[in-house]
Amino acid sequence: MIISTTPQLEGKRITHYYGIVIGEAVMGANLFKDMFASIRDIVGGRSGAYEDELTKARKLAFAEIEQEALAMGANAVVGVDIDYEVIGDKGSMLMVSISGTAVRVQDIG
């Protein structure tokens, strides 16, 4: 499955548009992750716990759009947009939302 942020794929021709596909993943951040992230805010550095949760959420959302596109008969998703949000009480949840257009492509030539 080809997944791209571009509206076209070089060397390929879009032969059919199936429609929009969306993948969303919401991950909760627990008390310990929040506590260690707060410490990192004070002393500086990266928050590995939050980065791991964002990575998991992004992978889940990409898997969802790929599954949805395959179910439609598509072999690619173009025009992909990725959004990250902090939601919930006190920003305790991380959300990744990915959308794009499921298409069928064939090689040119």
Image (cartoon, grey):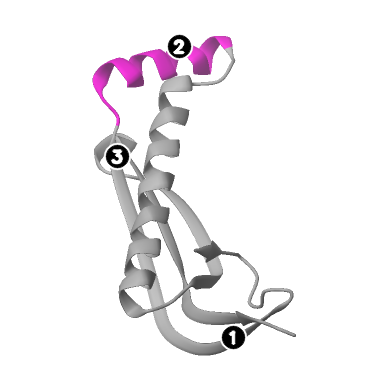
Q: Give the residue pinned by disc 1.
A: 14
Residue in the picture at 59% in, 16% down: 45
71 relative to 59 in the view: left or right: left
User: In the rendered view, would you say 55 is above or below 100?
Assistant: above
> What is the total number of numbered labels drawn onto the structure image?
3
Residue 48 position in % (x across, y down) = 47, 21
Q: Give the residue pinned by disc 3.
A: 27
Which one is in front, 39 or 75? 75
Circle 3 Cα neighbour tier, 10 Å, few/some/many (<14 / 14–19 / ≥20): some
Decide which of tag 2 and tag 3 comes sooner along the chain: 3
Q: Report the mark closest to the observer, 3 or 1.
A: 1
Residue 39 numbered tag:
2
Which of the 4 image quarters holds residue 79?
bottom right
Decide which of tag 3 and tag 1 comes sooner along the chain: 1
Residue in the picture at 53% in, 66% down: 80
Residue 85 position in % (x across, y down) = 41, 49
Residue 78 numbered tag:
none
Residue 67 position in % (x across, y down) = 33, 63
Residue in the picture at 55% in, 20% down: 46
**Span of residues in magenta:** 29-43
- Provide the secondary structure element on which disc 1 rests: strand
- Provide the secondary structure element on which disc 3 rests: strand
Which one is in front, 101 or 49? 101
Decide which of tag 2 and tag 1 comes sooner along the chain: 1
State how far apart marks 2 and 1 are (Cα). 49 Å
Which of the 4 image quarters holds residue 37?
top left
The overriding secondary structure of the stretch rendered in magenta is helix
- Provide the secondary structure element on which disc 2 rests: helix
State how far apart marks 3 and 1 are (Cα). 34 Å
Which one is in front, 92 or 3? 3
Residue 5 part of the magenta segment? no
49 relative to 5 in the view: left or right: left
